[in-house]
Amino acid sequence: MDFKPLKILVVDDVAGNRELLHKALRSWGHDPKMAASGEDAVASVAMEVPDLILMDVKMDGMGGHEATRRIRAMTGEKWIPIIFQSALITGQDMLAGMMAGGDEYLPKPVDLYQLKAKIGSFLRIAETQQTTEEKAARLEERRISTELRAAQMERRLNLAVDAASIGFWDWDLASNVAHASANYFAMLGETPEMGVISGMRLLRRLHVQDRQLMVKRIRVALDSPGASYQQETRMRHADGSFRWVHVVGRALAQDEDRRATRLLGVTIDITERVRATTALRENARQLRLLSRRVLEAQETERRRIAHELHDELGQSLTAIKINLQAHESLRHRSPDELKAENLRIIDAALQHLRELALALRPAVLDDLGLLPALSGIAEQTAARSGFKVHVYCALTDPRLSPDVETACFRIAQEALTNIARHARAKRVHIDLYHDGEELILGIQDDGVGFDVAAMRARAASGGSIGVLGMQERATLIGGQLVIESSPGKGSAIRMRCAAPPPTEVP
């Protein structure tokens, strides 16, 4: 043995771990001593200062971090290398260990070869230090280096926390004082006052409907120190609104009754995520509702067309057939009279057929484009309802993509139908123009107006398929539909979608 044996204190509350380390250290030529708890370790160091300490982190009673802090306070400037052993090693655990005064971390179960290498490095440091002054300087340099590494890790952790908008808080249950990070106060819409807040205020900020469940989960955690809890809840902002947050907490430390004395946790703002999830659910619900109503509307329209074909075209063709079959029995009428009557019946049937075709799909939309189709449907609706319509178009190209033209026509058609039924308007304006890279379709009337919120409620409950249909058509072409109205002040519908104007060719 060509080195001075080290006095090594092994601190572990598991007898099997102590026996394993004792046997290994003895075989390497060192002088190990055993401590079964943090309290025993502090007492042992008070009696004889070792050359190195192997410290378990998680132990019943006093943990490894607290025992290290007490040993550092007790030994003063004499620096004793302390190697932590833990089954859980994260960035926060290593930071906490360094702040407590540890030098190294080894994962459990301990790799004996790795442990021997760590001890060897400390042994080489001890052998190269010739004088007490040199030893003190080396240890002081190592202490400063350790503190610098801990400070760097803390800064990196703080930067990551700031980037992720995570609010930290540490609630001391005995004093009812909680220390919170700046991000936490930012979630509340407040300016941090020395980073301190009343512990109970953390709970009072929660929505009253969520508070009871949170208190229940905290009580369960307090009865099991080290246990964690989490909950998505609503937290009141300084402006009176509520924001959705995800709270994760853990009970730490213990009093004499083995109850936790601190709660440490994080609060993450998830308002936008909850809003997006709620919007997706609402869109899915409305889509299901719209699909059901569309199917119902299709069946209704099919029945109407069947009745029209049977009642109008069927009767017209039947009348012509009767005239042709009754030629011999109607000798009192001249052939010219019968011919004229048949032609009149055929003309009426053709006109009715054109009206059916126009209602299903206006040919002018496919043949001439959106503006002539809008002008035609506007004139027809105005003639039936008695209001005046002005159509303004500022498109440089008369044709748009077929899906955009169809959506604009159907939105305008539905809007004009609603105006004719409910608005009692005298004037209607239809505007179609480009705003930068977007196409704008606006329909405005001077009618009696309506309550938009009530209308949307009826639409959401399935009472108005027209509004849902307009919104869905705008969504399908990547657009947005805005409806503005109030009782007695008319109404305005504006659809905006991406449809860049054509590039002019010189």
Image (cartoon, rainbow, N blue to C red):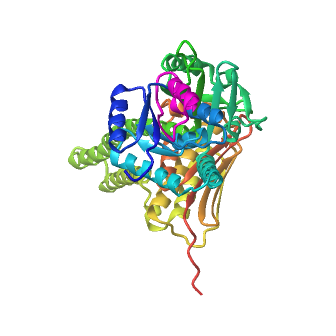
* Residue 66 lies within the magenta run: yes
Direction top: furthest residue: 257
Left or right: 24 in relation to 399: left
Is residue 175 visible from the viewing direction of this image?
yes
* Residue 18 lies within the magenta run: no
Tell me which segment is drawn in magenta: 38-67
Image-quadrant location for residue 315: top left
Residue 221 lies, with reference to residue 237, above or below; the image says above
Identify which residue, 408 or 439, lies in the foreground.
Answer: 439
Identify which residue, 257 or 118, lies in the foreground.
Answer: 118
Residue 163 lies, with reference to residue 237, above or below; the image says below
Q: Which residue is pictured at 39% across the width and 46% down the height?
A: 115
Q: Which residue is pictured at 30% across the width and 41% down the height?
A: 310
* Residue 70 x, y percent position in the rendering: 61, 31
Image-quadrant location for residue 249: top right
Is residue 247 visible from the viewing direction of this image?
no
* Residue 60 x, y percent position in the rendering: 47, 22
* Residue 163 x, y percent position in the rendering: 61, 50
Residue 268 lies, with reference to residue 473, above or below; the image says above
Identify which residue, 147 or 294, lies in the foreground.
Answer: 147
